[in-house]
Image: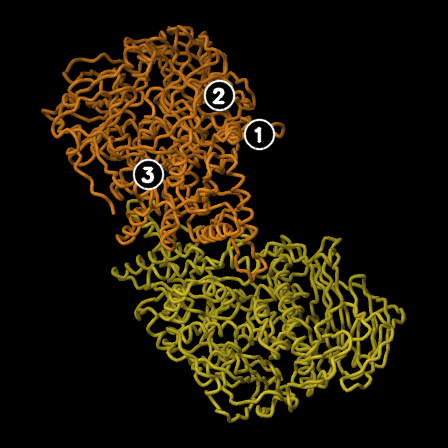
Chain colours: A orange, B yellow
Amino acid sequence: SALQLPQPCGRQGDGHVTHLNINRCHMIFGLFSNMAGRSQQLATSCHATKPGMLNVHLVPHTHDDVGWLKTVDQYYYGDRNDIQHAGVQYILDSVVDQLLKNQDRRFIYVEMAFFYRWWKSQSSSVQQTVKQLVNEGRLEFVNGGWCMSDEAATHYSAVIDQMTIGLRFLNETFGAFGRPRVTWHIDPFGHAREHASMFAQMGFDGFFFGRLDYQDRARRMRNKEQELLWRASDSLTPPMADLFTGILPNGYNPPEGFCWDQLCSDPPIRDDPDLEDYNVDDVVGCFLVIANSQSTVYKTNHIIMTMGSDFQYENANLWYKNLDKLIHYVNARQANGNKVNVLYSTPSCYLQELHRANLTWPLKTDDFFPYADDAHDFWTGYFTSRPALKRYERISNSNLQTCNQLEVFGEKAMAVAQHHDAVSGTEKQHVANDYARKLANGWQHCRVLQASQLNAHAAFLSLVFLSVIQFSVNVYNPLARPVTWPVRLPVNGTAYSVSDASGKAVDCQFLQVTFDPETGLISIELPNDVLLKRPRYNASAGNNVESRQPSGAYIFRPNSSTPFIISRTAKTEIIKTSVVQEVRQWFAPWVSQVVRLYADSRALELEWTVGPVPIDDSLGKEVITRLDTSIKTSEYFYTDSNGREVLQRKKDFWPTWNLKQSEPIAGNYYPINSRAYIKDDVDQLTVVTDRSQGGGSIQNGSLEIMLHHRLLHYDFRGVGEPLNEISGIFPDGLVVRGRLLLTLDPLPTAADMHRPLAEGMVLQPLLTFTAGDLKPNTQLEFSGLLAALPPAVHLLTLSQWDEDSVLLRLEHQYQSSESKVSSQAVTVNLQKLFSTLEVLGVAELNLSANQWKDEMKRFDWTPEKGTGHQCCVS
Amino acid sequence: SALQLPQPCGRQGDGHVTHLNINRCHMIFGLFSNMAGRSQQLATSCHATKPGMLNVHLVPHTHDDVGWLKTVDQYYYGDRNDIQHAGVQYILDSVVDQLLKNQDRRFIYVEMAFFYRWWKSQSSSVQQTVKQLVNEGRLEFVNGGWCMSDEAATHYSAVIDQMTIGLRFLNETFGAFGRPRVTWHIDPFGHAREHASMFAQMGFDGFFFGRLDYQDRARRMRNKEQELLWRASDSLTPPMADLFTGILPNGYNPPEGFCWDQLCSDPPIRDDPDLEDYNVDDVVGCFLVIANSQSTVYKTNHIIMTMGSDFQYENANLWYKNLDKLIHYVNARQANGNKVNVLYSTPSCYLQELHRANLTWPLKTDDFFPYADDAHDFWTGYFTSRPALKRYERISNSNLQTCNQLEVFGEKAMAVAQHHDAVSGTEKQHVANDYARKLANGWQHCRVLQASQLNAHAAFLSLVFLSVIQFSVNVYNPLARPVTWPVRLPVNGTAYSVSDASGKAVDCQFLQVTFDPETGLISIELPNDVLLKRPRYNASAGNNVESRQPSGAYIFRPNSSTPFIISRTAKTEIIKTSVVQEVRQWFAPWVSQVVRLYADSRALELEWTVGPVPIDDSLGKEVITRLDTSIKTSEYFYTDSNGREVLQRKKDFWPTWNLKQSEPIAGNYYPINSRAYIKDDVDQLTVVTDRSQGGGSIQNGSLEIMLHHRLLHYDFRGVGEPLNEISGIFPDGLVVRGRLLLTLDPLPTAADMHRPLAEGMVLQPLLTFTAGDLKPNTQLEFSGLLAALPPAVHLLTLSQWDEDSVLLRLEHQYQSSESKVSSQAVTVNLQKLFSTLEVLGVAELNLSANQWKDEMKRFDWTPEKGTGHQCCVS
């Protein structure tokens, strides 16, 4: 049964406040968990294996996208089965029934967004039964986050949050037995190193995935390197960010011929010997061939087979009835000397056997981007797909963190949007709309809370044009240090007096447009000779010469490697005020940009507007911005991993294997979640993005980012519609607006510039408005902190956990050697941190807050000597 | 729990043999059953209804074709789900699980071919659970035959057998609680009166079906005549063949929008009020509209809804979870004064409420052929579809009866072939092949048994050409009277001496072909001026003017109402011997016929050969034979019903309603199972067929029969392939051969001619061969009967039931007034019937042998006065 959780503040401190030493990339927190007993349970709940035989671990599983072709609700209820047959409520009903029919059977479940909803609609007797199944290891949770997050388009802050929500639910519902030991990213389209680092810090023992570059897989199969040790951080001391990683043999599908779900058509086992169709010998023979073949590309005498796929097990009887027979008939051959042993298993049980094998494993220090499943099939388009949704997700996260700092709410909408078919942009249009709606609902809750917490009037304004005579603006800064932030408001008056909280007048400017048209590309007072271009690629529609692959929501495949310049001239306006210098440029009716330099800023802001992308030539288009500089990059450039650590990239090159490049543009694109930079020995040009995008450096000194794409073909990866965003507001095609911040710095201080710049871009001030006079004695200024945190320390999470405790995550936001000053360790005195909270005690937890840090015991793994590529960022 | 069955011979007689009075169309038998307790159980197992409300009986059900798009085995196991998703083993697994989850739930099951196979693979604990469900009325069997038999193409003998097998299994497994009270023919394409008569004599209380002519349905809806009393025999005294008949509201499907199977896409009930997608009010509102609308076309305050369809309930949870909610939320409206009450129910429970209503019901005495579901969509093609399989089925029945007379075996293959997608010819080609294979397996068993029972040598010949020097032929006559039967053997010698059992020489003739070519249609010494023609229709491929409906496996739709004469001349040979006169005619390379008149016969034999039907003009073709006579038919003609009673037909006319004819040929076609005739005041021309075929009388004095058709289009009724039979033996298209027996008689004695003729055609002598010398003292003659039965009495069944008892069915084979002599009642002394059996006692049973005749208590129903059309055959 579930274990009782201790009181959080009794754990450590007992009223004495700890001074925390915040090391590089290291996070700390207050909360609790209790995981005693889980390791004993593993040893007893796993089926015995046979040492002298090939042990085949059959892992029954379902992959339940938290939205893709259907919305989350449609998937849960099994609505709109005309789009895709899938109903998660029935999957869980059925699996529980079938697990009860034979205690040998096993199942794993991943997505708490669905499980939570199902759980709360069960009777207490069903809940009790499920707890029993979990305690006995017959139902095992893996991953355990709210969803299976995308790895290319997500920000680490949101990933940690969504994992925390799911794992907290498991901990509170099932106690120690519910804690996942394995993380399971079977479907995401490429794998980020920061994800591996986070999973290690969350206490996971191993990581399994299904998709990697086809050339990489072929090589790893030859070398038996499909199981490896991933050292996922340059900054954390091993094994802190080491994660055992297993590449699954068939993606996440069963071997060919052995799919027994209702969604499949493979022949069932017909074991009535009276029948003409009796096929047991055929099935067993075929299975043995497959198992023996698979064993030649893995290291141990254990292999894993994923027996399930998308939304399978809705009628689990079909799977289990045939798996029962398969196990029975294959193992019956042992009596004749056959050396294959098949068993129901789970990833944890399989991992335990790998660990017991006590081998050494190849070490990997880079990441798994980009992902190509064939020579012309690079999944790099989705880095940019649905740019409006990607921004909405990012700004929602900023708002959520603000709200969290006031009260815990609205989390779930954010968590759902981390799914690998959500923020990735690879869902159907109607599903994207549903995600946006869910995020908007979260905002609505947040606004009401802000209004009440910030002591505002009942009347609450979020008007497009502010037309009231007098109003006040609340500005909430979620960062743990002061920021300077230009507040831009649309007003319809022509003269306003603006004062701050202390009543002092504020320097401000109104929309006094001066027309000053020019011709040609403008080069204003830039810090250096950066040439801004706004070209586009025409999307391939597929051809029969090299490949039929067209560009789509997932796949980027331009029909030429030379981009088309949209216009060599631009219509231009220039505005100069005491606050800002602004150049407005129109390259075409559907491409414009505003270049801004604020008086107190060293960063240049590029506000780009793209759309509706014209399609009257029947060609889809990928629109990029390209910065051509004189920086001598030697074909290197740098991109962040999930907004946190930065990885080195090199054109047409993978650090760990010999790449044969087949797509000169798409094959050199990488995810950019928060920043990318190019540099030489002197200068570094960093671009900070306001959302996840894709980009690359195709030529020396050049950095390009894809801003928007509109495509007319479907790219054959399941979504079944072209990425051609049209809505009621944008009947001619979506118009997207965004910002890039450019900063050109001397190399030694570049990180000191881009880290706070990106921090401020991710968590930005939230404005709320109150009409009319303020009540007398309204508090006009408030700070939750007694003082700013040191520059190296980012306030990642401040969130009410329960009545008596708060979840706090403080993060060292600099990589080990990127800043001479800021990369140093710092100490924070928590007692002197908060203005209104009294800190009675602190207990340190793992990153996902579901385990005491000092109880986090992970499997130890030994890397092979001489493997691993040290990926230096300095 | 199941009841103990008494010893059969203890029931009645006790050693005293009963003289049985065999009345018209009345059958008697020996065996046993015990049905005590079933009526009490009904009263308690049905959910209570509410008198002042509209009670909606929801009947969860699955319709499991015993072969159609897949073979029986494929359907059972869920193999080849790429053809059609269907796996009956899983349906039964799932339904049993789900019935246990909520004791309010109900389910009905129909096809014992599947249920029996599932049952025998269950553990005893599951079997015990299922018995409990049956005893409590939560799982109810309806129909209960081995399959749901086709009604147009089946012979009553085989239907009775297949019902007997299924019902016997139910009786022996579940006792009284397993006896179906309702028969359920929801899918067959038109309904035969003889089926209703048989069902009445089997003790069923009611009959439900789904398909009837679209004009007839519209009329019955208007008049609330969808529930009626069917008086199904002219010969049996009412209510002996009266059967309450209900026409289901949606075929056998749920109302639109309420299909919650995994095969459907209707929205599930989303009752989480937190959701945007919450739809309970919509669903309840829509359901109430449908229920109230349906109640306007039925008589009582009870209506039935069939909640299921083809192969549904494979994952019964989907259905039941939503039905539970539907019932809950609809009935919750009663608190607000709503007058609709929804309940789980079964056809028996529904029927009980109709009976309690104590109303009068419209009387019907004709049948439900032909079936049209739209103006140009007459399902009359399947009367002839797959003529080779239809013959194979018929001859297999003959063999089976022979085998039964020796031992019980091989029944099941015959039973399966009665299914409405088997002998009907509307299955896919590969399924037809599987049926044929199953029948062949049955033959193989039978041959071995014959060899042993007939005391033959081990060497057993079934060669195409008999090439041994000496062989003996065993001829087994399964009729209960002597027959004269020409034995035709293919031999490759030129001179044989033939002797009978007593050693006397037999007059015989060898294949001494004399060529005597002639030109033109031949008119040999026929009893009258019957003109034989062999025309064809060209099949419609559908057109956009009247209807897109093409001819297919189900639908007959010629593209012109005037048939094309294949040839006005014929190449001819004539052979005359002392045994037979034979004229061989070739109308075309693919159409020929042999006209034979045996010396001792008054019937003319037409042996027709058709195929490969040419399709080089890209037109499908329906090949008919047409007899044009001078008989003054006044547009009347007559066809049998399932080979037994004969019904009057009239061109463009239905006896009970005002037909608007839209297809002058196809709309006048009727099933011919054994015979059709035309007559006037003087003469009657009867054609006896060797298989089920379709035919009509389009012009006065004319009778046409469709022999074969080959079609190039699919007729949109689900089978998904055109009926274009090609095989390894017939790569250019199937060649079919068959026989018609023609007899022209004075009207008063016509039945005395055609009844024995048809009896001999259905049960024909079986030949077996033994090579070489016979062993000394081999018994050369054997008769199971002491003497021939009277002409009116047909030995329908003689079959070993168990070690001590035999199932005997004696049938009066004349209709009430068709023969002055033979229609009279006769008495048979069973004691003096058998040569080798001593009759110790006889107990009379219902027709299906699962109930004591004197315990067969059926609901009594009162017909409305003035309804019913007396269909006279005399």
Labels 1, 2: one chain: yes
Chain on which label 2 sits = A
- Corner quadrant of residue A821: top left
Q: Quadrant of the N terminus of chain B?
A: bottom left
Secondary structure type for disc 1:
loop
Label 2 sits on residue: A654
State which quadrant residue B827 falls in: bottom right
| Residue pointed to by mark 1 | A542
Place of residue B260 in the rendered image (x, y in percent of width and height, measured from the top left): 41, 54
Number of marks present in the image shown? 3
Give the residue displayed 19% in from the left and 30% down from the top: A843
Amino acid marked by disc 2:
Trp
Question: Which label sits on residue B342?
Answer: none
Tag 1 subunit: A
* Relative side of B409 to A504, left or right: right
Secondary structure category for the residue under label 3:
loop
Numbered badge on residue A180: 3
* Camera-side residue of A447 and A68: A68
**Chain for numbered disc 3:** A
- Badges 1 and 2: C-beta atoms under 8 Å apart? no
Answer with left or right where residue B596 lies relative to residue A840. Answer: right
**Which tag, 3 or 2, sits closer to the chain's start?**
3
Q: Is residue B218 visible?
A: no
Give the crowd class for mark 3: few <14, some 14-19, many >=20 residues within 10 Å.
many
